[in-house]
Image (cartoon, grey):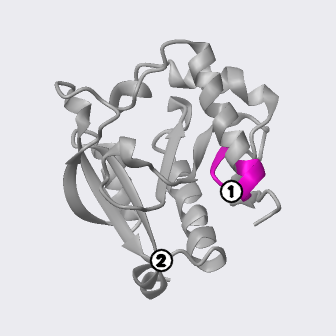
Amino acid sequence: MSKTTTLSTDRMILRPWKDDDYAPFYAMSSDPRVYEFLPVFPDKSACDALVDKWREVFSRRGWGFWALENKDNREFMGMAGMHEPGPEFGVGRPCVEIGWRLAPAFWGKGFALEAAREIMRFAFAELRLDELVSFTAVGNTRSFGLMERLGMEREKEFDLLLFPPDDPKRHSYLYRLSREQWLGKG
């Protein structure tokens, strides 16, 4: 895919990252409520480097992790999208992960569900992927609850290798949804 994809829902635009997104993404990612189950950035430059990586993937592939923008006021809301986790994640097989991270002001309002449904539509209907996976720490009931609302099924428990062996966030659930399951629910 050569062009960069922008997606849209009733309330959001899922778009490529802009220079103006770095500061609000770092502020969001520095909130203890947001990183409760995620790796912590040691500083702003590490956070910026991740966004730089996502932008590079977009320029090469045309999709990845999108910035979420509120249609009403153009406010940065967070991110959601897809990527291919490497062996450093510990999933144990090649896959495409769907994930999300929203600022707390947007929690509990259906935004993550709305973004994830549009990403699934894009993944299965346009990219024609065979499956999507998602993973989170065992304690992150909000995240795996969303995975279940999306129709995903728990495949296994595994150690997310991004965390040290003694970190409770390391113990994670892997969920999956096949294209066939998605078509059956559509």
Q: Secondary structure at mark 2?
A: loop
Q: Please, is residue 66 above or below residue 10 in the view?
A: above
Q: In the depicted view, which residue is nearer to us: 73 or 35? A: 35
Q: Please, is residue 165 above or below residue 72 in the view?
A: above
Q: Please, is residue 76 above or below residue 110 in the view?
A: above
Percent position (x, y) of residue 52? 69, 32
Q: Secondary structure at mark 1?
A: loop
State whether residue 92 appears in this view. yes
Name the kind of residue labelled 2 in the image: Asp
Which residue is pictured at 72% across the width and 50% down the height? 58
Toward which corner of the image does residue 23 lie, by quadrant? top right
User: Which residue in the structure is indicated by mark 2?
Assistant: 130
Percent position (x, y) of residue 166? 16, 24
Q: In the depicted view, which residue is nearer to us: 135 or 59? A: 59
Percent position (x, y) of residue 177? 38, 71
- Dot 2 or dot 1, earlier in sequence: 1
User: Which residue in the structure is indicated by mark 1?
Assistant: 63
Name the kind of residue labelled 1 in the image: Trp
Which residue is pictured at 50% across the width and 83% down the height? 186
Q: In the depicted view, which residue is nearer to us: 83 or 86? A: 86
| Left or right of 154 in this view: 42 | right
